[in-house]
Image: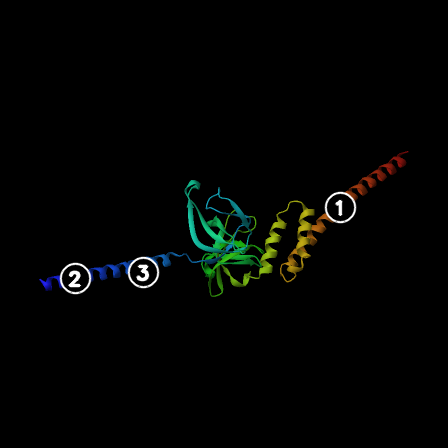
Amino acid sequence: MKNYYILTIALVIATLFSSCSGSESSESSKQDTTQNEIPESVDAVSVWDGISVREQPSSDGQWISSISLGEKVLMTGKTAVDSAEDNREYVEIELGDGKQGWVLKDFVVEGTAVTAVTETQIFKRPDLLTKTDKSFSSMDVLALMDTKDEWVEVKGKKQGDNWFSTGWVKRTDLSDDEVDIAVAVYAQKAFEIESEDKRTEAIQEILENDAFTSSQFLVDLRDELKELNSDEEELMAKPTEEMDSVGMDKEVAETDETISE
């Protein structure tokens, strides 16, 4: 009987030990799972200008701020779908000032900002035999997503297009200089101004900004400004030419009238 009690006590102790060990193992497993579920933050860039950042992943969410074309952000790794808006996907981002919010996934790309420095042919793959009929223009701002040898994969909207193009381009056709990127963004906005006078003012403002003096695009902007000024001079000269023509016609008419008399 004494042995029976000893055996019973031993079984109870073993059961308790096993239960505690299992509980610790389960708790450790939960912690590991939680740690694995923590999303990883990655560098990203806005490929559209003026995208709204909201407190909630919905167009009805409280507006926080907006992000500019080419602006650097941090994607936190959190995503959401708004079922009320045709399942539009949102990603959570962190801005340069530390504020966090949600933006539409289409307009923020994992990668870094670059700008085309010349007319840039787009290829399907990093191979010269995969040329497409599309290209990026000088001062198009893009997101660099991947690199392979002298090739890079990019995504962005060509000036004048309505949506994005994605493909591989030569690395030498791009600049990752933040001054070039800033000038490209401001230049695009200037080019979209319909009024030639206001467009001229916007370009002149870029050229006179001391922060932009190192940009390689200033030569192109000066050429654009010269062209605008020459167009304006031609328009101003036209009325004078027309008046001279009218005066000459009047003089010829008076001379003919005198001769006939």
* Residue type marked 2: Ile
From the top left corner, tell me how far across and down residue 41 is, in percent: 45, 58
Find residue 28 and name its label.
3
Crowding at mark 1 (Cα within 10 Å: few <14, some 14-19, many 20+): few
Disc 2 from disc 1: Cα separation: 109 Å
Place of residue 175 in the rendered image (x, y in percent of width and height, measured from the top left): 56, 61
Between residues 24 and 203, which one lies in front from this camera angle? 24
Mark-to-mark CA distance, 3 and 2: 29 Å
Residue at image position (70%, 47%) is 197
Q: Amino acid at mark 3?
A: Ser
Secondary structure under tag 1 reads helix
Label 2 sits on a secondary structure element that is helix
Residue identifier under label 1: 236
| Residue 9 screen position, x and y as percent | 16, 61
Q: Residue at x 42, y 46 (%)?
A: 81
Q: Position of residue 100 (x, y in %)?
A: 49, 52
- Which residue is nearer to you in this view: 3 or 236? 3
For the residue pair 75 and 225, the one nearer the viewer reads as: 75
Of the image marks 1 and 3, the number of the one nearer the N terminus: 3
Where disc 3 sits, the SS reads: helix
Q: Earlier in the sequence, mark 3 or mark 2?
A: 2
Q: Is residue 161 visible?
A: no
Q: Is residue 45 left or right of residue 241?
A: left
Query: Which numbered disc flags the more N-terminal residue, 2 or 1?
Result: 2
Which residue carries the number 2 mark? 9
Residue type, label 1: Met
Judge depth for marks 2 and 1 and give the one in front. 2
Crowding at dot 3, Cα within 10 Å, few <14 / some 14-19 / many 20+, comes out as few
Quadrant of the drawing holding the C terminus: top right
